[in-house]
Image (cartoon, grey):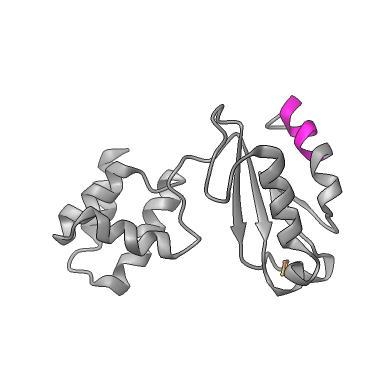
Amino acid sequence: MSDLIDDIIERHVNIDRDGLIPLLQEIQSSQGFLSEDAIIRIGASMDLPTSKIYGVATFYDQFRFEPKGKVHFQICHGTSCHINHSIRILQELERLLKIKPGQTTRDGMFSVDATSCMGACSLSSVIKVNDTYFHDVSPADLKEIIEKYKSNPLNA
Ligand code: FES
């Protein structure tokens, strides 16, 4: 994995702050998250303190710093889903799983992210669990969805 990070960093030589975002995106896409090791390597390659790299990355909610769980929830917070109470869905998920967006449960089973529009606004609120989309979701639906995936994380 480290070699892959080095390869990606080498393709982004002489970048400025604007170029940092695509670099972080590419590394996250290859690893599934931004590891501490990757952040340190990026800082070293740009001659910037690690805190600066974290400062930029944490500004954007697209970046996560922990590996995803076996069951990954994505909660749409686009306009249409927002109007249809996506915040309440996210709050209920946080309550049930005891994690915030960007975090993973200690057992590695569940993780949560808030995402931009998933392109199915007329079906809002929309959530995605691993590769499956759920529409017209309400907070009351979450317990059942979690239980279903808990017993069969990959093929619920
Ligand atoms: S706003 Fe949620 S799918 Fe478009």
Dominant secondary structure (helix, strand or loop) of the stretch shown in magenta: helix
Is residue 85 inside the magenta stretch? no
> Which one is in front, 6 or 77?
77
Q: Is residue 147 magenta?
A: yes
Q: Residue 73: tell me if it is visible.
A: yes
Hey, which quadrant is residue 60 in on the image?
Answer: bottom left
Q: Is 76 positioned to the left or the right of 85 in the image?
A: left
User: In the rendering, at what x and y percent does residue 150 appear?
Assistant: 72, 29
- Could you tell me how many numbered marks the image carries? 0
Magenta highlight range: 145-152
User: Which of these two is toward me, 96 or 131?
Assistant: 96
Residue 108 appears at what percent x and percent y?
55, 30
Q: Residue furthest left?
A: 47
Q: Please identify the quadrant where the C terminus is shown.
A: top right
Rendered image quadrant of residue 121: bottom right
x, y percent for residue 119: 71, 68
Instruction: Give 49 or 29, whichever is nearer the viewer.
Output: 49
Q: Is residue 17 left or right of residue 125?
A: left
**Which is more toward the observer, 44 or 103?**
103
Q: Answer above or below: position of 105 versus 90.
A: above
Using the image, determine if residue 56 lies above or below residue 27.
Answer: below
Q: Is residue 156 visible?
A: no
Q: Residue at x 75, y 54 (%)?
A: 89
* Residue shown at the point (68%, 32%) measured from the top left: 154
Residue at x 42%, y 51% (from the top left corner): 28
Residue at 34% from the left image edge and 64% from the top image edge: 56
Which image quarter is the N terminus in?
top left
Left or right position of 137 against 109: right
